[in-house]
Structures are given as C-alpha cells and as structure tokens.
C-alpha cells in the first residue's frame, strides 16, 4: 500500500537533508510507519508564515538545548544549516540559551553543534 505523504512532509525532509519520501523511509525504520507519519505531519508548522524555517530552526535548537536532547539537537543543527543558518548564528542561539537552561546543557550542545558543523557539507 502506498501512503500519501502529508502537507509539510517536504519540510521534515529538508531538516533531515533528504526528500520527503526518504524522510518517511528513515523515520519508518526508526519508529514504524504510524509514528513516522505523525512526525511528517509536524512539517505543517514549518510551512507557516509567521517565522521562516531558519528562525524556526533557532527555536527548535533553543528548546532542545534546554531539554538536553542531544540526538534531536544534532538533527536540528543540521536542519538549521539546511535552512541557511550560519555557524555563528547557531552558536549564538546556544550561548543565549545557556543563560536560561544552564551551563552544562549549553556546553554539551556546543559540542554536538561543532561536531555537526565539522561533518556538514551543503547539499
């Protein structure tokens, strides 16, 4: 059975550095197809006009730093780069978040971000 991908699935693909179909395949392998579809539905938020995708990436990075979720942070630092963010902007978001989320979370986040930045190549 072929599934029709929801509106916004391309946004999730872009964050992941892939197409929407590849994102679905990857997410299905990680979580199963039902959860993968729910994740793809989140892409609608990324297409709203109130913030750019780049700005939404900064919000996601700040939230993930505060929560201490390093694996998801890695994905969203990559996504921010895919949305045109610079190294300096990403590090500034993390530095600013340090004030509110704490030194430990921010220094771990900088380590994650710098690893992503070292490995990143624009597609």
Image (cartoon, rainbow, N blue to C red):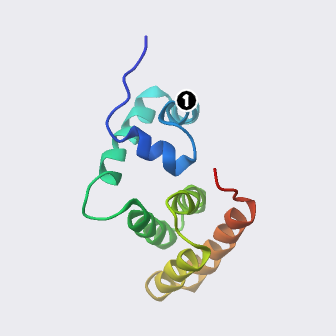
Q: Is residue 17 left or right of residue 93?
A: right
Q: Residue at x 55, y 29 (%)?
A: 25
Figure label count:
1
Q: Residue at x 55, y 47 (%)?
A: 16
Q: Which residue is drawn at 35% across and 63% down?
A: 52
Residue 122 image position (x, y, % from top left): 65, 55
Residue 14 image position (x, y, % from top left): 50, 47
Which residue in the structure is indicated by mark 1? 25
85 w.r.t. 49: above or below: below
Work out which residue is located at the far right of the displayed protein and give it. 118
The secondary element bearing badge 1 is classed as helix
Give the quadrant of the N terminus: top left
Work out which residue is located at the far bottom of the displayed protein and give it. 99
101 w.r.t. 76: above or below: below
The front one of 52 and 26 is: 52
The front one of 48 and 77 is: 48
Q: Picture quarter containing residue 6?
A: top left
Q: Picture quarter containing residue 81?
A: bottom right
Q: Is residue 42 left or right of residue 120?
A: left
């Amino acid at each position: 059975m072929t599934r029709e991908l929801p509106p916004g699935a391309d946004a999730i693909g872009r964050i992941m550095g892939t197409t929407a179909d590849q994102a679905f395949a990857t997410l299905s392998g990680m979580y199963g197809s039902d959860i993968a579809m729910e994740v793809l539905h989140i892409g609608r938020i990324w297409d709203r006009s109130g913030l750019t995708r780049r700005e939404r990436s900064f919000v996601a990075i700040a939230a993930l730093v505060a929560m201490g979720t390093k694996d998801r942070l890695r994905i969203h630092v990559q996504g921010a780069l895919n949305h045109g963010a610079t190294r300096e902007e990403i590090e500034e978001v993390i530095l600013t978040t340090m004030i509110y989320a704490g030194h430990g979370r921010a220094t771990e986040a900088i380590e994650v971000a710098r690893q992503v930045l070292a490995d990143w190549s624009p597609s």
